[in-house]
Structure formats: C-alpha cells, structure tokens
Amino acid sequence: MNGITRRGLLKLTGGMLVAGAGLYRTPGVAQAPRFQDADRTKDRIVAVIRAFDPGYAMPLPDVQQVKPVPDVVVPGVAARPDQLPLIDYFVGDLQLRYSFDNPRYVSSVSAADLKRLKLKREDLLPLAIANFRRLYPNFKVERLQPSVASVTNAGELEPCLMLDAGFWEQERERVRSEIVAAVPAHDTLIFTNRSVTGTVDLLRRVAAEVYGSAGQSALSRKLFLWVKGRWEVLA
C-alpha cells in the first residue's frame, strides 16, 4: 500500500496541545500569529477526537463516558492551571479535546476561556456538537459498498461526527441494525451495518490498513459499536 493516501485506501477497499496556540492541519504552512480573544468565541468551539498515549496509566472506559480528565499535563509547557487545555474521556482509548476551530488551526479551550465566555464545563459537549453541524453542514457520507460508508468533507474533523447521537440513531433506524464504526486516523471515520455478514471483518481490515499507514495522524485501532444511544468498544 506504499504511496496510497488514506482516502485512496478507503476507495480501493470499497471499494501539541498548547493552550491558546495554533496546531497545524496542513504541513508546510508558516504559522500565523496566535488567535486573539475575538477569534476565540463560543460559536467556534468543537470537540476534536484524539487518542490517549499507549502508556496512559489510568483505566479507560469501554463504554462511552464523557467526563473530565484530571491533572492534565502538557509536556514541556509551563502554564497556569486555568490555561491548560480541557480534555474529557470519551470511549476506549479516545478522548475529547475542546478547541476553537479555524480552517487552518485548532486552538485549545481552557478554564480561563470558560470564565471569559460565561460557560460551564458541562456546556462544552452539546455546544461542540451543535457547532460542528453548523460549521460543517456539507459533510458527506460516501457509500463505498452498500453496507460500508466513509464520512468526508468535514474539514478533517470527520471523527467528530461520532459525537452526534441524532445522526447515529437515524443511521441505525435506516439499516435496522446496530452500527460499527472505526476512526483509525485524524481525518477518517468509516462505519458499517453489523447485520451484514462479513462487513465487520472488512471494516477491521480497512481500519488496520489506514491506521498502519497514518503515521503521526494515526488515531485508534479499535472498533466501536453504537448501541443503546452510546458507543462501546467492540471486542
């Protein structure tokens, strides 16, 4: 699979966390000045899905459980506690990093930002979901095969669609089956209908190929099952 992009791989098969600083989405572009407060507004907050480091010491939930990660530490960065990025557990090895979205950058949300914007911590997830749908209304679901699909056109925030319960309930009702999803890379969300024979195994193989080719953009090897209105790690 050398030389094949992650997008190309999907078609063939089916076919820095620094509070207040920018994080590149496009390599090779000179970094712009830091966001000002005028850019860091509540209507730009999204929840970026990332993975815990393999050596993370605390137990991780096999069933979706959004709650704050305590004692966040950013290696090599000295910052006041209220300036550190806010991070939540999500499911399995996935976490949520709340950020101010921009076409070129992601800038972390801190406790100081919550105070400035008069928000509570529990406001973040529903706000992030609503903002994602408003900021990326033209995301697409590409049916690679009748029962295997890929999410595209969401500004490389495709995995964030995992947070939209309304979408997954609608998809579950459409196919009359449980849904299995994978987020093997920062810009990749693929899913399938669990009731169709062989598709979960196909999804597992595709996810492994994408994860293996993603380099520093790799996210998770795991598969996730949508059941009872939440995600669970699929063994």
Image (cartoon, grey):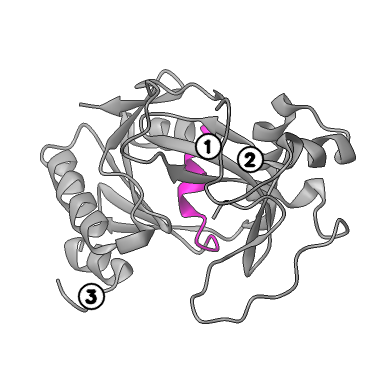
Q: Amino acid at mark 1?
A: Leu
Q: Is residue 162 magenta?
A: yes
Q: Position of residue 164 (x, y in %)?
A: 54, 37
Say what secondary structure mark 3 lies in.
Answer: loop
Relative depth, front residue between 177 and 27: 27
In primary-sequence order, the first of circles 2 and 3 is 3
Q: Which residue is mark 3?
A: 4
Quarter holding residue 57: top left
Q: Residues within 10 Å of mark 3 (few under 14, many from 20)?
A: few
Q: Quadrant of the N terminus?
A: bottom left
Q: Amino acid at mark 2?
A: Ile
Q: CA distance from mark 2 to mark 3?
A: 32 Å
Q: Position of residue 23 (x, y in %)?
A: 59, 62
> Could you tell me how many numbered marks the image carries?
3
Q: Position of residue 80 (x, y in %)?
A: 74, 39
Q: Is residue 42 left or right of residue 130?
A: right
Q: Position of residue 218 (x, y in %)?
A: 33, 55
Quarter holding residue 175: top left
Confirm or deny contact between disc 1 and disc 2 (CB under 8 A): yes
- Up-down relation of residue 121 to residue 117 (above or below): above
Q: Is residue 122 magenta?
A: no
**Which residues, given as a range, are shown in magenta?**
154-165
Relative depth, front residue between 60 and 16: 16
Q: Which residue is mark 1?
A: 163
Say what secondary structure mark 2 lies in.
Answer: helix
Which numbered mark, 2 or 3, is in the foreground of this view?
3
Number of the label disc, if any, that sits on residue 129: 2
